[in-house]
Image: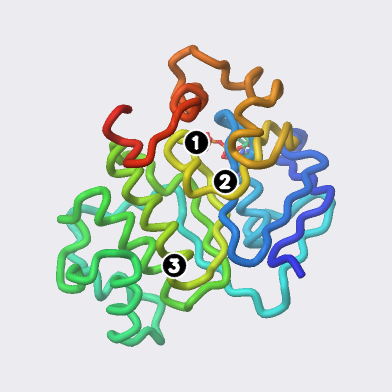
Amino acid sequence: MNLIDVKNLHVAYGANTVLRHVDLHLEQGEIVTIVGPNGSGKTSLLRAIIGATKPVSGDIHLKPGLKIGYVPQRLHIDPTLPITVERFMRLTGGVSKAACRTALETAGVPDLLKRQMTKLSGGQFQRVMLARALINQPDVLLLDEATQGLDQPGSAAFYQQIAQVRQETGCAVLMISHELHVVMSASDRVVCLNGHVCCEGAPAIVASAPEYRALFGTGTGGALALYRHDHDHDHTHSHEAAE
Ligand SMILES: Nc1ncnc2c1ncn2[C@@H]1O[C@H](COP(=O)(O)OP(=O)(O)OP(=O)(O)O)[C@@H](O)[C@H]1O
């Protein structure tokens, strides 16, 4: 049984239909990346899955009892508001200090508990957001452009952490990214969205699909266009060095 099954989803804001005929599924333990141009409905799709946006029609079926951890696109914390990582992680209540520590360890930042949120680097901040999403030991992590604002080595390191989290916890991951060339090594499957699903499959298949190329080009210098170039040859080490 799939963890998430979306069938024939339509989402609209007033007269503006942003998603039509969208099918999507997520299996146990897989990492699926959604790519698509700005405004193509990626966030709307995730929000429909978590129940924050009501679809016009279609079915969204979640495996009974499914626990979802959500890492939103961006969270602004008032720089004048002093709050430690521990307090931030325990804001929702019912969270033990031990659970915070474990989640921070899994997110790769075991030593941040007493630090001020506003003094964290971008990469540390996103790992704390990841830790917060991991606290309830979710079956699925949903990440909405979680590396926005990070530089490329920072993004690559974050996605490596995601792959490690999947390995350690067995959770599935559904994420939005503009950086397919960075996430490709961590993605089992890619879904290219532009109001509808243009194409999907293994990263290499999507990258060579005419629909994908029509959206992102093959050599125009756009971040996604790099993807083709980078993976015509072998990178056994990190992606960040050459990019
Ligand atoms: N709450 C809302 N009310 C009205 N229109 C909205 C709302 N949220 C999103 N939209 C519109 O729906 C379309 C899809 O937006 P969405 O945020 O889902 O796209 P996206 O692919 O995630 O974009 P981006 O890559 O820029 O984050 C856009 O045209 C956007 O302006």
Picture disc at residue 180: 1
Q: Residue at x 55, y 30 (%)?
A: 38
Question: Badge 2 is on which residue?
Answer: 33
Look at the image and tell me in which quarter the C terminus lies. Answer: top left
Question: Badge 3 is on which residue?
Answer: 133
Element carrying mark 3 = helix
Q: What residue type is disc 3 on? A: Ala
Element carrying mark 1 = helix
Category of crowding for the residue at label 3, using alpha-carbon neighbours closer than 10 angstroms: few (below 14), some (14–19), many (at least 20): many
**Residue 232 in view in this figure:** yes
Residue 98: x %, y % from top left = 30, 86
Look at the image and tell me in which quarter the N terminus lies. Answer: bottom right
| Quadrant position of residue 208 | top right
Task: Give 144 or 84, whichever is nearer the viewer.
Answer: 144
Disc 2 or disc 3, which is closer to the eye? 2
Q: Are marks 2 and 1 in contact (CB under 8 Å)?
A: yes
**Residue 109 to residue 100: above or below:** above
**Residue 224 in view in this figure:** no
Q: Residue at x 37, y 84 (%)?
A: 95
Residue 97: x %, y % from top left = 28, 85
Element carrying mark 2 = strand
Q: What residue type is disc 1 on? A: Leu
Labels 2 and 1: the sequence-earlier one: 2
Category of crowding for the residue at label 2, using alpha-carbon neighbours closer than 10 angstroms: few (below 14), some (14–19), many (at least 20): many
Q: How many marks?
A: 3
Category of crowding for the residue at label 1, using alpha-carbon neighbours closer than 10 angstroms: few (below 14), some (14–19), many (at least 20): many
